[in-house]
Every structure is written in C-alpha cells, then in structure tokens.
Image (spheres, helix red, strand yellow):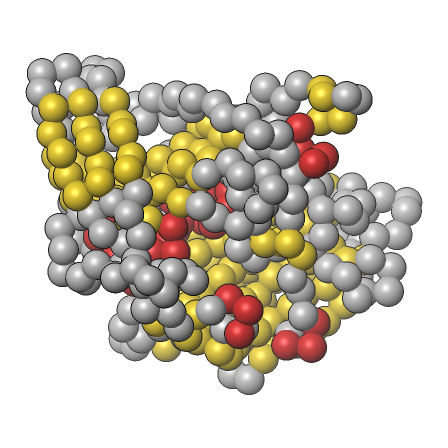
Amino acid sequence: MQLIMVTETESKQFQYRKINLFLEPLLTPGAQDQKNTFQTDFNEKFGMFICFDILFYYPSRSTIASGEIKNVIFTTAWFSTVAILQPLNVQHGYAVANRVNLLASNMNNVTAGNGGSGIYGSNGAVLSYYISGLGSSRLLISKVGSNVQQSFRTQGLKGFNTFNGKTELDSYITQERFDSNRFTIRKIELSTGVETVEKVCQKKFCCEFNINAVVPTIEEVYQLVAYDGEDSKESKIRGRIRICALMVCDSRGESCASRSILSTTKFLNISVHTEAKNEKEHFYQPVTLRTKLTPLEPLTQEESINEDIRTINVFTKNNTDIILFGLYGRSSGSTIFISSTLLVFVVVFRTLF
C-alpha cells in the first residue's frame, strides 16, 4: 500500500505492504515488522492496514496494542458475506472492540459484491457510511478525534435515493453463507415483558444471552448459535474461530441471518457474555447486522482478564430489524495463499481544531 498524505503545510508519503493475502498467489506479502504508522502535523497518530489484514492479530491488533494509536485507516475490496463477515459489520466491530476511530474505504464493485464504507468513532458511533448496489461512490466526511464530542445517529440510511422504483440497496449483491451443520443451534422463545436468559455451547465454548424484547403478534423465529473450530475452507483462512450469535431465521429454522427475513421484534436490551482462556494473539469483536446491512447502535464491548481467563461482554439496547447480534473471535492463523497486494490511497487531512 502506498499512502500519500497531504496536509496544510507539507506533503508526506508513507508505504505499507499488505501482510495477509486473499487469493493473490502472484504477489508477495509484506513483513510483520514493517512500519505502518505515521503522525500528522496536527499531532494525531494513525495506523493503517489493508483488507484481509483486519482478521489477523498482525497487523490489525498489533498496530494498536501499545495504546498510542487511536486512529486507523483501512482500505479494502471486501466481498459482502452475510451474516458474520459483512463489510460494515466487520468495520464497526473492529472500532467498537478496540475503541479507535476507523476510516474504512471499500471498493464499490457492484458486479462482484464489493461495497460498504464508513467512518466510525472510538465510542462505537457510526458517524458516516455508504453502501449501495449502484456503480457509484460517495465522499464521506465526519469530525473525529480525541477532543470531538461524538454522538450516535438514530436515523436510518443516509442519502438513499430511489432508482427505477428501487432503493440503491435492493440491487446490492450479498453472498449468504450459513452452514447450519457446523453450528450448535438452540431455538429460543421470546415473550414481551419477560427476561430471557439462555446459554448455547459448542465443545467447552459457551455464551450466555440476556434478552428483553417486545414481541409482535406475528411469530418470528430466533435461534442462538455457537461455533468453536477451524474456519471454513471457503474463507481461505487457517485458524480457529469462535462465534456465538442470536439470529433471525425462517419459519423452519433452516435459513438464518438473511436480509430477506422479516424482523420486527423490538429488543429493549440484549447482552452476550462469554469466558475463554486468555491466549496470545486471540481477539474478539462484536458482529451485528440489520436487514439494511448496517450495524447496531449503540453498541459496547467490555473485556476483563483475571489470571488466564478473559471475560467478554457485548451490549446493545432499543433496536429493531435485527438479523444478527453476537461475537466473533479468532486466533491469528494464516492465509492459505502466499501473496500480496499494492494499493494507493490518498488522504487529505485538515486540522479541525
């Protein structure tokens, strides 16, 4: 990656080569110890990495491990895969889990299913985003920084116009990959005014959900799912992943977390809790999604470590149209294909203070 930064006073050039490659056998990966941070002339430090890197400890977590980096630039050509690894949900989950400002720029290639960019605050706010099924682009601008008061948006999609009687999102391509055979699945019954406490486990990995909801008169099916094992062959990743989630499903419980399934239940509060051995280079982040392919707000993740046990909690409140709420964890692992990529990213910075 070549980053060219233009500020009010000078022009600087920074280079970063992608470390973790996806189906790029002719390219060479960058070194783990390469420098991927820089400081602006308005005294803000930034980290940067590319696409598939966000799913690996090196560099997505190692970059911010010292606590000095609070701003991250992320460029990608991410394919939309419902539900766990949808672009906006991955971007937002990273910002929430690590409490950093994230500037994410995704290539909008509608024929390949690429698209979904956003700016996310360190408090978990989705400050600005764009996702479209049209071959178009949009400049996203938000005020971020340690001295900026950030607030949550409560509105729906911003700036969506109609196109031949359809919204821009209708023609957005998503790949739906939910292999129920890999998961431990438990159907839950929700009742208005009754707190639902349920646990779902696979092997020794367990997650406990606490849910308060207002249930509609039309029956909707929700299931808890858990997974602890190797990533799927389709993802081209070697490494252990852990998933626990609440998903909306069709009436038979076979198709889950699909954007085509109606979800009108109002969730007043949802939380998920899990405990796991505190292993080096393992990390967790929330995964949340609406039928409009946007993440949930407000969203909070809290972690604590007691001796060698890590405790993770994720919370949200007052949300409807939920098709997914849960946690995604993984070991650093490795990519199957040895390769690399080179991207050019131009960023214009201007001091806002």
122, 75: nearer the viewer:
75
Q: Toward which corner of the image does residue 344 lie, by quadrant?
A: top left
Number of dots carrying numbers = 0
Q: Is residue 31 left or right of residue 135?
A: left
Q: Toward which corner of the image does residue 167 lie, by quadrant?
A: top right
State the residue at coordinates (54%, 26%): 136
Quadrant where the C terminus sits is top left
Residue 190 x %, y %: 78, 56
Q: Is residue 236 in sight in this rendering?
A: yes
Residue 270 x %, y %: 61, 51
Point out the residue furthest to the front here. Answer: 26
Q: Is residue 39 left or right of residue 125?
A: left
- Say if 6 sits above or below 101 in the image: above
Quadrant where the N terminus sits is top left
Residue 146 x %, y %: 25, 30
Q: Is residue 143 left or right of residue 272?
A: left
32, 71: nearer the viewer:
32
93, 196: nearer the viewer:
93
Residue 229 x %, y %: 50, 79
- Say if 10 sits above or below 329 in the image: above
State the residue at coordinates (16%, 20%): 7
State the residue at coordinates (34%, 21%): 143
Q: Is residue 60 in sight in this rendering?
A: no
State the residue at coordinates (46%, 38%): 107
